[in-house]
Amino acid sequence: MKRGILDELRAARAEKRSVLLVTELPSGAQRVLGYDAAEALGGPLRDAALAALRRDQATVHGEGEGRLFLQPQQPPLRLLCVGAVHIAQPLVRLAEVLGFEVVVVDPRAAWAKAARFPTGVTLVDEWPDDALEELAPDHRSAVVALTHDPKLDDPALEVALASPAFYVGALGSKKTHAARVGRLREAGVEDAALARIAGPIGLSIGARSPAEIAVAILAEVVKALRQGFTPRALPASESAP
Amino acid sequence: MTDEAVLPAFGAVEEDVLGAAARWRDEGAGVALATVVRTWGSSPRPAGSRLVIRDDGTFLGSVSGGCIEGAVVQEALTVIAEGPAKMLEFGVSNERAWEVGLACGGRVEVFVERVG
C-alpha cells in the first residue's frame, strides 16, 4: 500500500466519507473510490462496488489474475440518545463496545450531570430537536428517544424521521407508543414515517433491568444495520390521553 | 493479543490499524498490512479485517481469532524485507494451517503488502 493511499483512507475516515479501496490481486495495485466514482464505473464492477459500499461488506470481484478486492470503509456508526436517563448508562457503554460514537442529548442539565457516562461520550444540553438538526443523523446513525416525556421525545422523533437514520426507536409501552403515534400523526407525520419508529423499542427478549433493555435495544439496532429495518405495524388508532 | 485495557472498540479497530501504519512509517519503521480477502466455512474474522505489522514484530488488529496471527506476522516480516506482496492461504487443506492452529475448520485467504 502506497503512502498516498494510506493517507487517503485516513483522511476519508477523519472526514466521515464513504470510500471503497480497490486492490488488484495479486499485484496489489490500488485506488480509492468515492460513491460518485463507484457510480461511474462500468458494467458488473459498478454493481459489485456499489453493493460492497451499501452492505459494508468486503468482497472479491472476478477470478484469477487481475481479480479485484473491494473493501468498503464507512464513516463511524453513531448512536444519538435523547435522554440522559438510567437506561442510557448501560446503553452508551454497550454501544461503545460495538464501535458506536455516542452522543447523549438532554436539556435538563441536572440529568446529564447526574448520570455518569464514559469519557468518550459527548453530552449535549440543548433541546433535542435543535441538537438533532445540528447532529444531522445520516445512514450510519441510530436515534433513540428515551425520556418518556413527549416534550422532549416527540420533536426529536420528528427530526429523526425526516433523516436517513437507519434506526429510530422510542422507549415506552404499547399504550404510550399508541398515544405517541396519535400525537405525531396530528403533527403531520406520515404513516410510512411512523412505521419507522421501533416502539416499543428493542427486540422482545423479556428484558427487565436497564442493562437488559439496553441489550434488547442494541440487538435491534444491529439487526437493522445488518438486515435492514422492517417497518413496524402501527398501533390501532387511539386518541391521545 | 492486544492488552485488554487498551483494546479499542471493535468498530474502531480499523482506524487504529491504519493510524498505527502511518505512525510507525513516520517513525522510520518497516510496516506491512495483512488483510483477510476471502473466507470459507467457519472463520472468525470477516473479509476486510486487518492486521498491521511493524518490522520489530509488534502488531495490531486481527485476521483470525488469534489462530494464524503468528504465521502471518512471520510472512509479513519477509514482505517488509523483500518487497513483493503475497497471498497466503490457511485452511484444513493446508498442512501448515494445522500447525498454526486454524482448528475451526475454516479456510482463509490473507493478502500481505508492504506499506510504502
Image: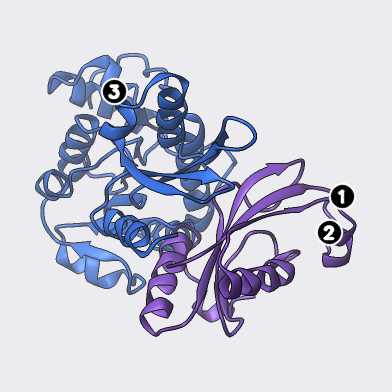
Chain colours: A blue, B purple
Type of amino acid at the residue the image marks with label 3: Leu
Please name the residue that numbered disc 2 is placed on: B97
Please name the residue that numbered disc 3 is placed on: A194
Find residue A25 and report its horizontal and vertical position in percent: 57, 44
Dot 1: few (<14), some (14–19), or many (≥20) neighbours within 10 Å? some
- Quarter of the picture containing the C terminus of chain A is top left
Dot 2: few (<14), some (14–19), or many (≥20) neighbours within 10 Å? many
The residue at 12%/48% (across/down) is: A134
Q: Quadrant of residue A43?
A: top left
Q: Quadrant of residue A185?
A: top left
In the rendered view, tell whether residue B93 sits above or below residue B6: above
Find residue A219 and report its horizontal and vertical position in percent: 52, 44
Type of amino acid at the residue the image marks with label 1: Val
The residue at 34%/70% (across/down) is: A117
Type of amino acid at the residue the image marks with label 2: Ala
Please name the residue that numbered disc 1 is placed on: B92
Total marks placed: 3
Q: Determine the secondary structure under disc 1.
A: loop
Question: Numbered disc 2: what chain?
Answer: B
In the rendered view, tell whether residue B58 sits above or below residue A225: below
The residue at 47%/27% (across/down) is: A48
Q: Is residue A202 left or right of residue B73?
A: left
Find residue B29 and report its horizontal and vertical position in percent: 46, 82
In the rendered view, tell whether residue A161 sits above or below residue A156: above
Q: CA distance from mark 1 to mark 2?
A: 6 Å
